Amino acid sequence: MGRAAKDNGSARWFVVSDDAARATVEAAIRGALAAQRSRLASVYVDMVSDHDWPAGARATVRLAERRSAANRHGGVSLTLDPRVDEDFDIVLALAPFSIGCTGTSSQGELIWDANDTGTSAAFALTPAEERAVRSAISRAGGAADDLMRLSEHHLGRRALNYSVVGGTAPAAEPWLPPDGWRAYEHTVRLGSGTDVWNAASSAVLSWGIKSRSGFTVDPLLEAGRIARRGERYWLVARIGPLHVREPVEVVATIATDRQAALAYGTLEGHPVSGEETFIVRRDENGNVNLTLRSLTRAGRGPWRGLFPLILIAQRVYRRRYLRALRRGGQ
């Protein structure tokens, strides 16, 4: 998943439980597609499945292949408009079995995602859409409770996947990073004065620096509330064509008249292992600075092979963090 579904501020991300029955998964994918149809402007569909296409989908596969062949670019994928009946029927038939389907709103924001032959699905649903999807699951004989908020999706079962918890030491100045880690620290001046301090400190403590840099943070914090130590979140990043869900835990916060900081660590299933901290400091002359610190190692499993790509994305996002608060403080 990529940028938040800003076209409707009440939308929240939902996923299907990992152990949900196949009937539940298919009904959720199709139910979300139908519920979100009026908000979906474009759906990208891969005409490839990890398994044989089911008999009921084969005629649609042939239709999609003819559509693709007629396209001057050819290929094994189609970009469809779900507001057009034929296009909608193609997506409806293929989405639960395709290796990759992505739906975006008229603002170009990801709001519907079904991948890996139905084993990975996520939708940014309004309350009315959520009710419609749960109803569709129930009508199909599935378990509506298997549609769950992304923020609740097994976060409680995950452990921190690194040993140096608190290693970014947001209260320490200077910082002495632990050995054996890819350590990063950089400080920029944001400006001066009370307004700059208030905006920057609030953005750091409420995940604003992340959301302004292109991440989706789930659950969203209520206006005026700050993150607290021990809370767990999903951070959803876009890395090229991939939409990566990152489970994290807040491991430290600081909120004083001179310093605001938030440190979070990676949980099992995160693409990397380590910790990142955002620190805003105000000196006696009113100057406000932002410091970024991180400790990084390669993640486990399939993510290890993607570590070089992740490091490139990390550098891109660091530049975004620095620009986000500079803009916000001016």
Image (spheres, rainbow, N blue to C red):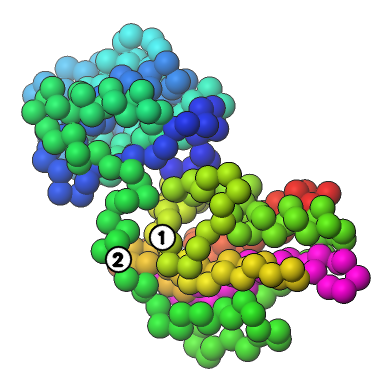
Residue at (18, 34) in percent of width and height: 144
Question: What segment carries the magenta color?
Answer: 275-300
The residue that mark 2 highlights is 158
Residue 205 location in percent, x, y? 61, 59
Asked if residue 31 is among those painted magenta in the image, a careful observer would answer: no
Whether residue 208 is visible to the viewer of this picture, yes or no, is: yes
Give the amino acid type for the residue marked by disc 2 in the picture.
Answer: Arg
Residue at (38, 10) in percent of width and height: 84
* Secondary structure type for disc 1: strand
- Location of the N terminus by quadrant is top left
Please say if 284 is above or below 323.
below
User: On the picture, is 51 further left or further right than 78?
Assistant: left
Please count the marks in the image. Answer: 2
Q: Foreground mark, 2 or 1?
A: 1
User: On the picture, is 194 further left or further right than 50?
Assistant: right
Q: Which mark is residue 245?
A: none
User: On the picture, is 129 further left or further right than 106?
Assistant: left
Reading the chain from its start, which is encountered first: label 2 or label 1?
A: 2
Specify the principal SS of the magenta part: strand
Give the amino acid type for the residue marked by disc 1 in the picture.
Answer: Arg
Whether residue 319 is visible to the viewer of this picture, yes or no, is: no
Please say if 221 is above or below 118.
below
The crowding category of the residue bearing disc 1, from other C-alpha atoms within 10 Å (few below 14, some 14 to 19, many at least 20), is: many
The residue that mark 1 highlights is 232
Asked whether 201 or 328 is in front, the reply is: 201
What is the spatial separation of the Cα atoms under label 2 and label 1, in whole angstroms?
Answer: 10 Å
Residue 257 location in percent, x, y? 74, 68
Determine whether label 2 and label 1 are within 8 Å by CB. Answer: yes
Asked whether 226 or 219 is in front, the reply is: 226
Residue at (31, 19) in percent of width and height: 34
Q: Please tell me in which quadrant of the rendered image residue 317 appears.
A: bottom right
